[in-house]
Image (tube, rainbow, N blue to C red):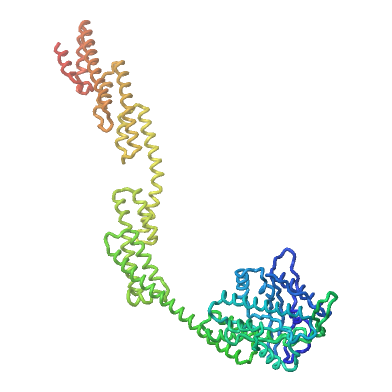
Amino acid sequence: MLAALAMPRYPHPLGYTCIWLPPIDAPKAGKQDKRLMNLYTSKEWLEKAIHKLSVQDLPEPNPASDEYFSFEYDFTASTHQTFCIEIIDYSGELINPVISNSTLAKNLRKKFTTMDGILVLAEAPYRDRLGHVQSAQKSRDGQTHTDLYQLQQTFSLLRSEKQEGAALDFPVALLVNKWDRYSDIDYANPAKEQSKLEEFINSNPPPPHKGVHDVLRFSVAEGNFKMFPVSALGDNEFVRLDNGDVVEHPKQANPLNAFTLVDAFIWLAQRRDAIDFQQFVEKGTLNKKCKKTGLELLNSLQKNSEQAKQIHTILQSYQKTKTRRIISTLIAIVALLFVTETTMDFRNYHQHIVAINNPHTTHEQFDKAETWLTQYVAAPYFRHLISRVFLSSREQAQKTLMELQAHRDKFLWEPVAIALKANDLPAAKAPASEYLKYFPLGEHAQKAREIKLNAEIQPRESKKDWENFVKTYTDYMNNGNLKQAAKWLLDRKPETAELKQLKDIFKTVVIEKIADKVTLALKEARFEEAWRLLEEYANSPSSLQTVEGTQKIAVLRELVKTLVIKTIEEKITFALKEARFEEALGLLQGYANPSSSLQTLEGFSDKIAVLQKQ
């Protein structure tokens, strides 16, 4: 039948036509295009079958396996409709006993969901047996019963797997092919042959085709089943082969005298469009793919047909409905946005107003409040519409914002003022920088910039000043001017860690230096200088003294006291022995001089007074 569709035939009485559309491009090496490879394999098989028929020979039957052939044909109906139909042959797969029920159902179900319809082929029986080999005929009739029963079982299984308990909504055609076996076909009167087919199906006893007919008819919705008497090759003749077998050959092959060969395909395509059209009308604008489905249907209908006009009406209604839905959705979204924005505005407004009036509000809370108010005031006119009516107008929000900024200005400047009052420029730098961050044009902005600049310059000046201070101190110490060095340390303000460390070093070094100078002065009998050095340390501030230093000075004071009195006694005694009374008296008068530093020596004045009496 597939080969006959691709061969020249006598014109159809109703003007139906069918042209095979073979694939043009062969599969390219290395590319696995499964569909293209299938079409090309199918083409090779069909060309062999056509060649066989052209020489009035029968082609080989389709291989009985789970592989299938696929062909594309272009059908034209007398209604000026053209259908490009892809025909997939499942004949071998349907009745292959090798495939299990579950595997068969799975394979068929997978392909079934993509099919627009099914055509089932069942061979017509011989009208009589005159002139035929009886044993061969009985075997042939028995095989027909077996094949049709397996076909009936297979479709029942497919129906139960696909849609259990409900009629399938797609077209199914039963093609009783090789109709020329049963009837002397009246090519000019197809209705007569259709009546013969009806009588044959309903004959008593029922033929094996009856079971398949009932399964197919009642498995689909009403109007989706039809049977056709078909003769793909026209009248056949029987030829006895050399081995004794009798085979059929078409009497005429070029052109073929086919009967209702294309009718079933055109009916199936038209019925498929009718089903799609009905579903399209029933779903109407509720179908999400309404536009796509409608345009596809319009391609298969005449432009001015009633169905086309109805589809155009539905598409227009769908477009209006879609537009209304879009507008409604947009309105709902806008309303939701307004409600959400207003809710957030009420919450934020009251939260920030409470924070502004709270004396314990932190700087971060002030910052959040000012940010929100700034955004509220600067928002476009279409924002915060409801809030500006029921919550706060733009002018009110602007006034609140200005009050908040003035409050924040004062709040941020207060730490700076406190640091300046304490004359602590470094401590004023951080809050001044914070002030400039939020108020670069604020009331105190210029002052804050000056503080920041001076605070950055001051460390460099302080470092240089400290270096000069240390240099002067070092010069005093190197020159032995311990008193001036101590005064230099005491006059330095403020008390820093570096200054404290330098004072601690001074406390240790000054004792050693005083001890060395006192020892040298005593050796050279410069008692007044030695005593003066010890007195200067004793009278120095306690912050420059240590316990160890005080103890060491006390020891030196006793040593000086002993040595001074002993030396004076020795000098006076020696002068008296030598009768140098004036020299002795001069020495005593010199030591008794009030300006002498030795007058502060404990017991010194008393000792001089005793020597003067002597």
Observer-nearest of 614 and 68: 68
Where does residue 208 sit, x and y in percent of width and height?
66, 82
> In the visual, does 581 lie left or right of 50?
left
Left of 191 or right of it: where is 437? left
Where residue 316 sits, quadrant-wise, is bottom right
- Which residue is farthest right? 242
Q: Position of residue 193 (x, y in %)?
A: 71, 91
Quarter of the image containing the C terminus?
A: top left
| Residue 611 location, quadrant | top left
Mark count: 0
Quadrant of the snapshot with the N terminus: bottom right
Most distant residue in the left direction? 613
- Would you say 16 lies left or right of 255 here? left
Closer to the camera, 565 or 156? 156
**Of 143 and 551, which appears nearest the observer?**
143
Where's residue 359, x and y in %? 26, 61
- The x, y position of residue 555, in whole percent, is 25, 20
Question: Dividing the picture into quarters, in which one does residue 535 lie?
Answer: top left
